[in-house]
Image: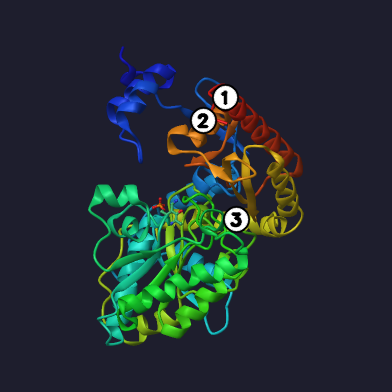
Amino acid sequence: MNALTKPENLSTREIQDLDSAHFLHPFTDYKDLATRGARVITKADGIYVWDSEGSKMLDAMSGLWCVNVGYGRKELADAAYQQMMTLPFYNSFFQTTNVPAVKLAARLSALAPKVGDRSFDHVFYSSSGSESNDSNVRMVRRYWDLLGQPQRKVIISRQNAYHGSTMAGASLGGMSGMHAQGDLPIPNITHIEQPYFFENGLPGETSDEFGIRAARWLEEKILAVGPDKVAAFIAEPIQGAGGVIIPPATYWPEIQRIVDKYGILLISDEVICAFGRLGHWFAYEKFGYKPDLVTFAKAVTSGYIPLGGVMVGNRVAQVLIDKGGEFNHGYTYSGHPVACAVALANIDIMEQELLLDKVRGEVGAYFAKRYAELNEHPLVGLAETSGLVAGMVLVKNKATKERFSSEDAVGMLCRAHCFNNGLIMRAVGDRMIIAPPLTMTLSDIDELMRLIRQALDFTLRDLKQMGRV
Ligand code: PMP
């Protein structure tokens, strides 16, 4: 009997062999993975996941910034089951709709706070963050076409941003490795430098001064492109996949001033930051800016089932609706009833368990306090949090802020020590990042900090042995 006919009893080695024989993973060096064998994750509960060898790991990345209500939620499984038995699928192309999609759109509209003259009464659905950003590009272009300004095509983004992996998503993103492989960006997308103070702050410059200077790169770019050609600016409130880069407090207000001055649309990509990650349903509220389009995905269902979308602000929605004509864009799964039913149940959990209040209150404050203590560690250049997301840069020399070279692979070294000692933490170059479930208790936070400190100690020990520090 071969492995395929006996799937329940596969050994880890057999699963790994089948995995490398048939499964092309995202963002993976296939040859390298085949020699190592993938770690097989088999079950999860609460804030922990287990692998096929029985190792238990505290999942400080919530899967991939998704599982905000934690694992093992029967309510979400029940919502999916009930909806599958009632109406597992129907499209929304043929002037048809379904009840969960309508209820969720109304619920999200109610949750998205009004800011200034912006309200969010409409939702466009997709199944992922990447698709949602493709929809943004389509919607932005349609908006300016309908307003008789079809020459406004250029979307400005930032280096080291992550907006997805489709052609448009990867183009909007500022990841040079992705651009290099895809002949990207597609035309009419251009980038400015990111607001990374630790890296780009000048000697003697304060973080607030840097925030203004970094925001003004947008104005310079608008002027270079030509203000009448610029359609929109897209940015994550906090850059997630780029390494949890938290902008200075002055950055967003200055960005707002600039987009207002030139009348360009503002897209807030909240695929990571929405649904409680920063203690709010949507992150623009925390920073106080006024987006026109808000991208969401991931934690809208806590990752239990794929769903994404765009909150469409009144400025754009009114033009799309009032000017009429068909919008030639959409997906088979736009408004998928099962995904929407799970999202509704997920929002119920967040409300019932007061998860956002906890992030803004005691849990968030304790997380910030304990995480800040990591700044004492000799390897840590700067450890920062916002809500329940955190990043730290590992440095060779704390006093001079000297960075490791890419050959040192310090992040991968630290990540291996995390994985091998019961902690899932992500490495982005020399940055270590986490986004734990919002259900973390104070004692869970203590345990998380113990595990992080231990991984840092092991990393430092190895670096010393290798003569790298
Ligand atoms: N935007 C942001 C800010 C993201 O972090 C991500 C994924 N990490 C995406 C878009 C793409 O989402 P997806 O992988 O669901 O396509």
Q: Report which quarter residue 144 is drawn in.
A: bottom left
Label 3 close to label 1 by CB (< 8 Å): no
Comes first in the chain, label 3 or label 1: 3
- Report the residue marked by disc 2: 413
Question: In the displayed structure, does residue 371 sit left or right of residue 246?
Answer: right
Which amino acid type is shown beneath numbered disc 2?
Answer: Leu
Which amino acid type is shown beneath numbered disc 1?
Answer: Asp
x and y, in percent, of residue 396 in the image: 57, 38
Which amino acid type is shown beneath numbered disc 3?
Answer: Arg
Q: Residue at x 24, y 65 (%)?
A: 187
Q: Is residue 231 above or below residue 163?
A: below
Q: The residue tagged with tag 3: helix, strand or loop?
A: loop
Q: Which mark is residue 462?
A: 1
Label 3, residues with CA under 10 Å away: few <14, some 14-19, many ≥20? many
Mark 2 and mark 1: Cα distance apart in space: 9 Å
x and y, in percent, of residue 466 in the image: 53, 23
Q: Nearer the viewer, residue 304 or 155?
A: 155
Q: Give the number of marks.
A: 3
x and y, in percent, of residue 17 in the image: 34, 21
Q: Report which quarter residue 245 is drawn in.
A: bottom right
Residue labelled 1 has its Cβ within 8 Å of some atom of ligand 1: no
Q: Is residue 132 above or below residue 462?
A: below
Q: Is residue 46 above or below residue 80?
A: above
Q: Which mark is residue 277?
A: 3
x and y, in percent, of residue 372 in the image: 71, 48
Q: Nearer the viewer, residue 460 or 178?
A: 460
